[in-house]
Amino acid sequence: MEDILKIFTGIFWFAFTLYLAYKIYRSIRIVSAQECIIVERLGRYNRTLHAGFHLLVPFIDEDSYYHTLKEQAIDVPPQTCITKDNVKVEMDGILYLRVLDPQKASYGIDDYQFAVTQLVQTTMRAIIGTMDMDTTFETREVINSKILEVLDQAGEPWGVRVNRYEIVNITPPKSVIEAMEREKKAQITKKAQISLSEGDRDSRINRSLGVKEEAINKSEGEKQKRINEAEGAAKEIESITTATAKGITLLASSIQNKGGKEAAQFRIAQRFIKEVEKLGKEGTNLVLPLDLSNFSSVMKSVLGKEPKP
């Protein structure tokens, strides 16, 4: 009997020694950066342990809560919301929060992550209920900012701050998606037809402008051509007139000289004879008021006197 008692006594002290060693081991705490531990002494809040080496009083102090001070990304599960025009849409999102006061996060609420998630879902349903379905796609930033305002007010007593919230997906029913696709296709087709008609209109306008400019250029060219021809003819006439005047002046001057008059009469006679020869080659019948058979009389009528033999 004594042997059995000794065995049980030995087991008891061995277990007690192990338990005491465990408690001493548990009284040593090394806290990593951006983490903290809430310590309770005899069931009441005592202090908050931050990064570093710490010792707890065995059997009196207890590490009750562990918190990370890093920014946390929490996934908000999908939920069904009903819009103002009675369309069911499924929405999910993600929020980013940070623990600012570990003591409030431990004693202000049981599970701040669960509480924030539920608050996001209820707030989202309330906001979506005031909007049409088309508006929900266009005002994501507005929805995010409104949810963030509500979370800022609610998160202060919990010792957390929500930095931002983002809607990930907005999924309407399949029938609504098909209707939206048909509407989008119709809009694209309409835009394409408008673009084609505008292109055809612009093309016709450009062609008409081209024809107009071509006609104007042609008329301007024809006008300039006629002006150039007229100027050329005028200069030609002016040159001929000037040359004729000079010739007449020289002829008059020559006639005044000795033998000039006889030379002029001789030149006129030669010219007359050449012209008569041309008339004879044409094969036409002409009636002349001159007696060509009597050359002397003809010359007398042309020159005013009978030519010398």
Image: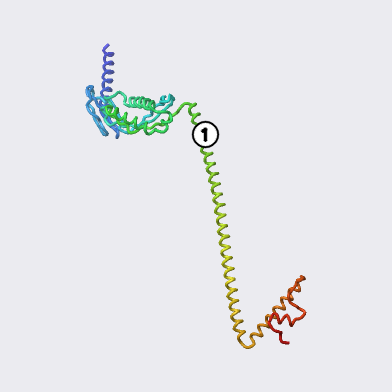
Q: Residue at x 25, y 23 (%)?
A: 20
Q: Nearer the viewer, residue 271 or 86?
A: 271
Which residue is tagged 1?
A: 186
Label 1: element kind:
helix
Q: Residue furthest top?
A: 1
Q: Residue at x 56, y 64 (%)?
A: 227
Quadrant holding the N terminus:
top left
Residue 60 appears anywhere in the view: no
Q: Is residue 199 left or right of residue 30?
A: right
Q: Is residue 253 left or right of residue 160?
A: right
Q: Position of residue 23 (x, y in %)?
A: 26, 24
Residue 249 appears anywhere in the view: yes
Q: Is residue 102 above or below residue 251?
A: above
Scheme of colours in the image: rainbow
Q: Nearer the viewer, residue 23 or 251?
A: 251
Quadrant holding the C terminus:
bottom right
